[in-house]
Amino acid sequence: MRQKRSRAGVTLIEMLVVVTIMGLFAALATSNVVQKIEAAKVTKAAVQIETFTTSLGSYKLDVGAYPTTEQGLKALWTKPDGVANWSGPYTLKEIPKDPWGHEYLYKHPGEHGDLPDMACNGRPDIVSWKQKRSQAGVTLIEMLVVVTIIALFAALVGPKLFQNADKAKVTAAKAQINSLMTALGSYKLEVGVFPTTEQGLQALWTKPNGVANWSGPYTQQEIPKDPWGHDYFYKFPGEHSDQPDMISYGADGQPGGEGINADIVSWRSR
């Protein structure tokens, strides 16, 4: 008496095809996520180094010289022994480690100019005296593979990628606001008062009319827009302390909002 075999399920070939496609996409998607996370760390490290450079300028204005190699960046937070005219701290919080969990390298006198040399121990190519832009791309084969399978997996992987990118932009906005607030402190030390609302953040880069004792620029580059391409809101006198109010209105560029549209403000960005 013959027995009939059940033919439900998938064949071995079908299973191998699915596993192969999933493996290819997982490899590409994982690589993309890792690249985005690494790019966010690189951006954060570059912003931190720029912030240190601004703080070191304020330190030198008071003390008359940059911290020595032995004193290091900690001199911005804790007064070194035997140093006069120190009126810090010159940073908003204790000196952080780089995004990879290492101490920043610091040397003064430096070897690349009058400023101290700083480098990211986790990524030695990220240094204070130059910036390297990462160049990434995909091969034609990778593009064809992604186009072929993106319809199957985009709903699962896409939201995660965008979420990571949004978090990186929020982190960058907070770091930029902290850097600009430090630069405003240097401006006030020399001019005697923060820029008015009308003068705005541009006063850190270009001398306003009628302002004495200005010896800027107080930033390493022209005033940036926020990570979503909008101008930072600036107001002085502010409404939340004796310091100016500065705001990034988030992804939508409008006051209020939630999530990535939420406001990022100077009085809560530390």
Image (tube, rainbow, N blue to C red):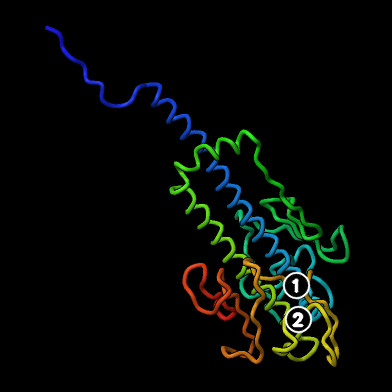
Amino acid type shown at disc 2 = Ser
Task: Return the residue at label 2.
Answer: 186
Secondary structure of the residue carrying numbered label 2: helix
Q: Position of residue 70 (x, y in %)?
A: 76, 63
Q: Residue at x 71, y 50 (%)?
A: 134
**From where the camera sits, is residue 36 visible?**
yes
Q: Position of residue 95 (x, y in %)?
A: 64, 67
Instruction: Point out the residue furthest to the left here.
Output: 1
**From where the camera sits, is residue 270 visible?**
no
- When the figure is inspected, residue 24 is found, relative to residue 176, above or below; the finding is above
Amino acid type shown at disc 1 = Thr
Q: CA distance from mark 2 to mark 1?
A: 8 Å
Evaluate if marks 2 and 1 touch, with contact meaning CB atoms under 8 Å apart.
yes
The answer to whether 101 appears left or right of 16 in the picture is right
Q: Residue at x 83, y 74 (%)?
A: 65
Task: Return the residue at label 1.
Answer: 54
User: Which quadrant would residue 146 be assigned to in this image?
Assistant: top right
- When the figure is inspected, residue 171 is found, relative to residue 192, above or below; the finding is above
- When the figure is inspected, residue 176 is found, relative to residue 143, above or below; the finding is below
